[in-house]
Image: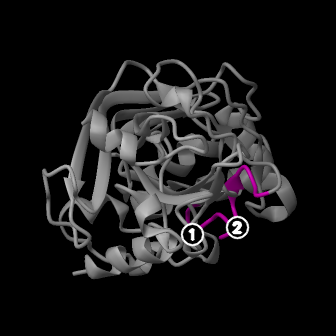
Amino acid sequence: MRRRSARLRITAVGAGAALAALLSVGSASADTTPQLAGDWAPFSRCPVDDPAMLAADGSSDVAQCISSHSTSGTMKLGNTTVPTGNADLQIGIISHNSGAPATLVAPSGGALVADSADIPGGLLGLMCPSKVPVISSICDGITNSTLNRVTATMVSAGAPTNFSLPAGIGTGQPMMTIPVKIKLSNPFLASTCTIGTDSNPILLKPGNDSAPSLAAQGFDGNGTPDSTIGSAMTRIAITGADQSDSTFAVPGASNCGLLGAIDLAVDLKTGIPASSGTNKVVLNSASTYLGGLTAPGVAAPNDGSTLSQYWHSAVQ
């Protein structure tokens, strides 16, 4: 493992591959995400065809794919806690031997793809009862579960920033900053209703709650596992640790309808805006993978294009 990790250059100055594994990668949109064979499977949205990724030469710049996935968790916003389902954060990273900060490349569909979750209590729990007459009328009109149901979906509100290599295998330190917003959906809510916006997002800074397990896995360009030292690709697996953050603030609801009246009703009932320390996100047993050419320098000046070629060869 030590020899392979040394050859997989994942940092701007050639630091250990494990340290970078706490970011994630993305490429195709959620609606057109392909399935990849073998050890390529976690990197289905890696932006291998982004011009910046393709331009990586393997000498001064090295392109890699990183993916982090959790199947369950919770998110507390103000006084409301919402269970979360599958959450997949993917992004490309280009490390620079010049010492400049790594370049993060998000997919066109956003770095984060997550399942929708039901808000406990639905619309009645989200903004009812209310002393605002127009809101009270809406509450009175909620006559069945379909009208009451509210789903919350966490979506990207910009590209991740502030990537920290040392946090990758450590605990309690933020790995990066992830701007997100929560889209609320219900027949009575405007389609633009969100908690947080692109200009005023929720800034998640997840870190490991415990030390994760670490393993290195070699594979061929098409995804077939290859345990030999000379494998074309190497994947670093960081698994088994919960990730969490309780430092983020939550802005109020925006663009939910009735000229801000619904925004206010949601805010009052949910307890938002909410300052740092009163909110928390937990991602259970996150699995994080980093993949790249085992020896990118050998592929110079075609590291990025070779990575793209291998990725496409694994599409099923």
In this rendering, would 127 be left or right of 268?
left
Q: Is residue 59 above or below residue 108?
A: above
Can residue 109 be seen in the rendering of this structure?
A: yes
**Viewer-side label of 1, 2:** 1
Please name whichever residue, 299 or 18, is drawn nearer the observer in this view of the structure. 299
| Residue 315 at x, y percent in the picture | 27, 79
Q: Amino acid at mark 2?
A: Thr
Residue identifier under label 2 = 192
* Sooner in the amino-acid sequence: mark 1 or mark 2: 1
| Residue 174 at x, y percent in the picture | 59, 28
| Residue 161 at x, y percent in the picture | 69, 46
| Residue 76 at x, y percent in the picture | 54, 31
Q: Is residue 55 above or below residue 298?
A: below
Q: Give the residue drawn at x 68%, y 30%.
A: 248
Q: Quadrant of residue 144?
A: bottom left
State the extent of the magenta-drawn residues as a range. Answer: 185-198
Residue identifier under label 1 = 53
Q: Give the residue drawn at x 74%, y 45%.
A: 265
Label 2: few (<14), some (14–19) or many (≥20) C-alpha neighbours in 10 Å: some
